Image (cartoon, coloured by chain):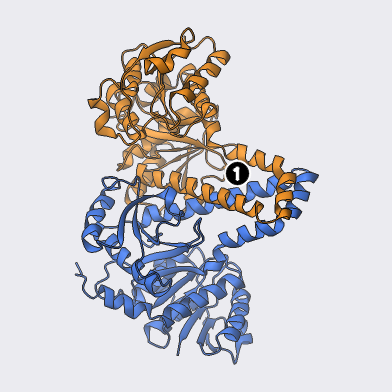
Chain colours: A blue, B orange
Amino acid sequence: MIRIAIDAMGSDQGSAMVVEAVRTFHAKYPNAQLYVVGEAKEIAPLEGLATLVPSTEVMGMEDGALDVMRRKQTSMLKAIDLVASGQCDGVVSAGSTGAFLTGATLKLKLIPGVQRAALMSPFPTMDGKGVIILDIGANNENRPEHLVQFAKMGAVFATKIRRIEQPAIYLLSNGAEAKKGSPVGKEAHALLLEAEPTLFRGNMEARDVLSGHADVVVCEGYPGNVLLKGMEGTAQMMNHLLKQAFQQSIFTKIGYLFAKKGLAGMKEQLDYRKYGGAMLLGVNGVVVKGHGSSNPYAFFNAMRLTYEMIDAGVVPAMKEAMSHESTN
Amino acid sequence: MIRIAIDAMGSDQGSAMVVEAVRTFHAKYPNAQLYVVGEAKEIAPLEGLATLVPSTEVMGMEDGALDVMRRKQTSMLKAIDLVASGQCDGVVSAGSTGAFLTGATLKLKLIPGVQRAALMSPFPTMDGKGVIILDIGANNENRPEHLVQFAKMGAVFATKIRRIEQPAIYLLSNGAEAKKGSPVGKEAHALLLEAEPTLFRGNMEARDVLSGHADVVVCEGYPGNVLLKGMEGTAQMMNHLLKQAFQQSIFTKIGYLFAKKGLAGMKEQLDYRKYGGAMLLGVNGVVVKGHGSSNPYAFFNAMRLTYEMIDAGVVPAMKEAMSHESTN
């Protein structure tokens, strides 16, 4: 039995979006046991499809790490608690990232051997294969050993969920040569050569992470966050310019009508909503963070990702992989 | 009189590309005094348009920081030497970035008061205004005080070359709130509030650097390099997908023909070649690094940028601005 806790509140689009996603999800995965936490009146339409857990407070988008533990009645904390108490196996929320990551880490605790949890997200690549990148922002500062653990955790995910037997792991750097990198990255490079002699393929520049050569890219949380958001901002700008380009004249507008179908395919390939969300790896439980601006389709995919991770036993596999790690 | 030293060798396209660019440049800026350094036979066609300085070695693209000072006969080092000796005011090269930055820094020396040179590049923005970002990779590791200096140097450039009287300066961070940032970034934030109380506007996420709100974005060299290359990689992927989208069927191909003109405008707006190159700020002389894959148009623009920086007195203005800095 797969049991998922769902924070119905706190996203940009509010609980109605979640209610719709849960409805669709229940139709496709009738065997999953769903716990929906939120304002009683707002989640009432899900009566009969899910176990409803009333909560009276909502974590705001601006609420951060410090607020989450103080505000005991929020839907977010209550949803996390369902996993901490063993009633559920995974939790999904589209609320404040900072609050969710802190709450999940403090309540669920790190897997024995894991020194730092990491936020991981799948990205589309040029060849359509996709790549996962971690840490994209759970940490502000990392030691070289953290990056080695991120590589191990990323490999478990790539094997279990993406079914890649020998995932190619790269280390984000400012050059492809082994001697390049931040001070932390240089040390991590040496450690990775020892710890992952077959899977680790060396350094990779940010320019190449979407090329399809890497299955897993590991990085420190701060530059990882810059990478993630730099890519988002560039895609946003190009979409904006593309729209402008098609609106320039009657000819470009006609051109758009002809090319529409091809462009829709491109949009689909770039659509982050397809990927569902980012995962917090390294904690005792499946934790999936949906995008704050999720629509029902995106939130459905975040739920599906949670389902798949529980089903594939990602957390037990992570525990097994990390059981030989020292905990200093 | 504006005197420019040109390294004719070491780019992906070789000296013929530079020869063509110099010819065009000379026609448009006949009053500039050009010194072209390179293989005697290859630069011979420029006889009469420029002072030709023969060199027998070429710095390879793979040559790094350590090679540059050892190999005395390279066109790159000889071109830098023309500035070091006072014969020229600026130097431009499309050869190895690592070698060029190291050579220029060691030979030209830092401006008194400057602790670290920074690599700066202009980027296109959503609103067409553009933004400059520094450091995009001259440094691997920075102290908070370096970022304050980068802000000052960026402001001088924005005022002198982009003619923005009160440039809006932002600090790259993993969140817009003041408390966000890398450990170095957090300290830099506090220092910037003191040093630049009117121009400094706070933190900015990587997602927003192309929004047009900032005139200058300062960052540590390592995440700055990740940002630059992450943006390049995303643009590359989107161009690739766009091409694919238009080739999908006879309809999308017709669509492309109609939309072509609008799309060309978008391409033009994103074209890095228009910007000419990146500048090394903080050294005693104008130093412009053209893209390794420059075509004659891009190299012409790199030369024009060098010309404009000399003409506007960027280095003297930088000296003035940095003269009150302590040198610890």
Residue closest to the far top: B48
Which image quadrant for residue A134? bottom left
Residue A188 in the image: state x and y as whole percent.
Answer: 25, 55
- Rendered residue at 55%/30% (across/down): B164
What is the crowding at mark 1: few (fewer than 14 residues within 10 Å), some, or many (at least 20)? many
Residue type at tag 1: Met
Which residue is at the front of the view, A254 or A41?
A254
The residue identified by callout 1 is: B126
* Whether residue B264 is visible: yes
> Eyeballing the image, is A53 above or below B323?
below
Image quadrant occupied by the N terminus of chain A: bottom left
> Eyeballing the image, is B108 above or below B170?
above
> Eyeballing the image, is B302 above or below A133?
above
Mark 1 chain: B
* Whether residue A40 is visible: no
Dot 1 falls on a residue whose secondary structure is: loop
| Count of marks placed on residues | 1
Which residue is at the front of the view, B227 or B61?
B61
Residue B67 in the image: state x and y as whole percent.
Answer: 25, 31
Image quadrant occupied by the C terminus of chain A: bottom left
Residue A161 in the image: state x and y as whole percent.
Answer: 42, 74
Residue closest to the far right: A250
- Rendered residue at 51%/45% (across/down): B209
Residue closest to the far bottom: A48
